[in-house]
Image (cartoon, rainbow, N blue to C red):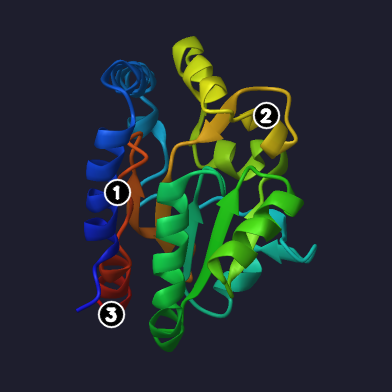
Amino acid sequence: MTQTLTETLADAVRQSAQRIPAETREVMLNANDEIIKTGIEGTALKTGDTAPDFTLKNHKGETVTLSERLKEGPVVVIFYRGGWCPYCNMELYAYEQELETLKSLGASLIAITPETPDNSLMTVEKNGLSYDVLSDTGFKASDAFGLTFTFPEALMKVYQGFGLNVPETNGDDAWRLPIPAAYVIDQSGKIILHHVDVDYTKRLDPNDVIAALKS
């Protein structure tokens, strides 16, 4: 039987714990606590809120507007950090595996990243994605959903130590990212299911999205 996304992510967390030194992990956990203390998880949009409209370019350079998509049916929107994040790739791939089921329920799927179009195209090709991946230049959508955070200094140093230049991959001048989030939005624009978590190893399982769409 195929693993769920939740199980796949839990396995990856266990492997990562063996690979990343304890002191580095502690810095990362402390930084997560710092981000949580900003209250971002509470102020981000959640179930019952109305999703703000957005117009962004996809990996092919085409314009995608949320309100236009909603005319066709419910929309599942995933905010992910970037193609450099293994947990994001697991999430994107897991949703690709369930894409036909989502379509059969009348829904479409959109993934949003702050990365440049060139970088998002690489992610699409790497994971064999057949749904839209949008570049959120300047964090317009991420800001509107209340998801953007600025890196604590210690976390920035850890990522630099990993050889990651986040501003460069985003074509931006600041160390910013969205916290990972997923939303199921009905045709009226209302959010009927959400998942927002500073802990980037936790994501909304496609099975929960399918259950929400069925109900």
- The picture quadrant where one finds residue 182 is bottom left
- The picture quadrant where one finds residue 131 is bottom right
Nearest the eye: 1 or 143: 1
- In the rendered image of this protein, does residue 151 appear above or below residue 18? above
- The picture quadrant where one finds residue 14 is top left
Residue 30 visible somewhere in the drawing: yes
Q: What is the distance, in whole Å, between disc 1 and disc 3 at their CAs?
A: 29 Å
Q: Quadrant of the N terminus?
A: bottom left
Q: Which residue is mark 3?
A: 214
Q: What is the distance, in whole Å, between disc 2 and disc 1 at their CAs?
A: 25 Å
Residue 12 — which label?
1
Which secondary structure, mark 1? Answer: helix
The mark that comes first in sequence, 1 or 3, is 1
Residue 167 — which label?
2
Which residue is depicted at the point 47% across and 61% down? 92
Disc 2 residue crowd, few under 14, some 14–19, many 20+, Cα 10 Å: some
Which residue is depicted at the point 73% across and 30% down? 172
Which secondary structure, mark 3? Answer: helix
**Label 1 is placed on what type of residue?**
Ala
Tell whether 65 sits left or right of 158: right
